[in-house]
Image (cartoon, rainbow, N blue to C red):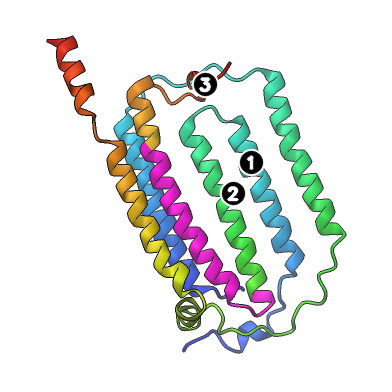
Amino acid sequence: MNNIDGLQDQLRLVPLEHYVFLCIVLFCIGMTGVLLRRNLINVFLSIELMLNSVNLLAVAFSVYHNDPNGQAFVFFVMVVAAAEVAVGLAMLVMIYRNVRTVDINALNQLKW
Amino acid sequence: MLNAQFLAVVHVIVYAGAIMVLFLYVIMFLNMSSPITIRKSKLVMGIAVFTGLLLCFVLTTALWRTDFGNNPAVVDQNIGLASTLGKVLFKEFLIPFEVSSVLFLSAMVGIVIFNKKDVKDEIDIKNNHG
């Protein structure tokens, strides 16, 4: 009962290139979201999408190369992502308290 | 399938259970009423989309030229299990594992400090409103 034996072994594996392409597409969508979005919360969500794509890529590689270190690395990426989201949202709440908006164009005080 | 059982559960708990809930709480407490209606200029939007497509194109070309070798006929189904991953985490990744708890602690301390009002600010607010 520990693993899904037999059936999984006989299923034809999805080629690794498909996983990599999916992760590339997800990453580029996330990056375009970071560049295009004006709401800070949407920017954070796009960053999370990029992190998720990298997680999927690392898991796919670790399974296909029989190396559990990839999945351990994904564990730590999730740790860092959770901490980063918490800190980022705390900063967002602080910004909102000062500027009363979450529009990124309102944060231009450091511009020349 | 990839059979990454432990990571699947951790993913659901962390992302759907913590991060999304945090986002929703923040959105709820911010109570933004005015939607952002003015879009960026068309030029900036076009450049952003072009950059995204360019990155996708570059990465896909790199993927095209890479030879991944043959897919393994059978993969070790024990890799994604919690027991295997737990052994790896506690043997080879013990120090990062313990340091990540310090990371969380520092993040929490930082967040709590973020949201403390300065005493000076409180006095200013009282003087301005009094």
Report which residue position mark 3 lands on.
A110
x then y, percent, for residue B21: 35, 48
Q: Which comes sooner in the sequence, label 3 or label 1? A: 1
Disc 1 and disc 2: Cα gap in Å?
Answer: 7 Å
Q: As drawn, which residue projects farthest toward the left?
A: B130
Residue at image coords 80%, 45%: B57
Is mark 3 in CB contact (under 8 Å) with mark 1? no
**Quarter of image, res A17:** bottom right
Report which residue position mark 2 lands on.
A50
Asked if residue B33 shows in the view, the reply is: no
At label 2, which amino acid type do we have?
A: Met
Residue at image coords 48%, 87%: A2
Q: Is residue A94 left or right of residue A35?
A: left
Of circles 3 and 1, the one toward us is 3
Chain label for disc 1: A
At label 1, which amino acid type do we have?
A: Met
x then y, percent, for residue B7: 49, 69
The label on residue A31 is 1
Q: Which comes sooner in the sequence, label 3 or label 2? A: 2
